[in-house]
Image: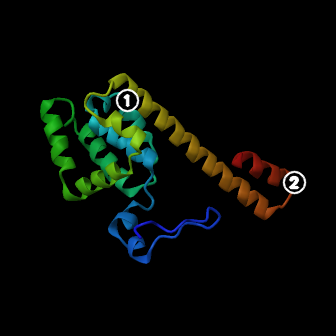
Amino acid sequence: YGQPAPHNRHEPLQISPGFAQSRMVRTTRGENPREAFIIAALLAHRQLIGPFADDLAELALEGQAAEYVRQAVLDAIGEDEFADSHGLSRLDSRLAQPRIQEAVTLLMHLIRAGDRRKLEVEADPDRVSDAIRQAIVLHHRARTLHSELKAAERALAEDATEAHFSWMKDVKA
């Protein structure tokens, strides 16, 4: 009574059809927790937006919510709205738009427990800056490896040689 049924580790976890259709699951598909952290950390520590503006502009994001928020921030920077105290309130008004606000809320739900402390006002800005930089580097590496894996898989499919198989194994490793 009240105890969940034991789960066999060898069977894949199944989610109920009702939960699979819930708004939470449907809207988080395609979103990346690392992207969510980068965006959320910059919003929580806005003094870091300027130093990371170029990185933010060059960041290739997979998630639609992350892209909406990133674009709102870049638009504010691009229009020189962010440069002064009036700019911060203008950025706030951009972030308050329903579509953007929904995206920010979604991203906040994706932040891992260990990263939530970095979003607090009291967090050390240098540590937050280092965490953002590390997340950006890892994001670039992951995208590069994913692209290389796809290329190796295509090469193996086109020409099943030992060299192509070895290349694919190396990339996966």
In this view, the residue in front, 138 or 51, is 138
Q: Residue at x 34, y 52 (%)?
A: 109
Total marks in image? 2
| Residue 29 visible in the displayed image | yes
The residue sitting at 25% across, 31% down in the picture is 121
At horizontal 62% and vertical 67% (from top left) the residue drawn is: 11
In the rendered structure, the answer to whether residue 13 lies left or right of residue 2 reads right
**Does residue 57 appear in the picture of this structure?**
no
Residue 119 vertical placement versus 168 (above, below): above
Q: Residue farthest to the front?
A: 1
Q: Report the side of 5 relative to 152 (left or right).
A: left
Q: Is 105 or 9 nearer to us in this picture? A: 9
Question: Which amino acid, mark 2?
Answer: Glu
Q: CA distance from mark 1 to mark 2?
A: 45 Å
Quadrant including the C terminus? top right
Which circle, 1 or 2, is nearer the viewer?
1
Residue 12, by quadrant, is: bottom right
Residue 107 image position (x, y, % from top left): 34, 51
Q: Which residue is mark 1?
A: 128
* Three-letter amino acid code at the position of disc 1: Val
Residue under circle 2?
A: 162
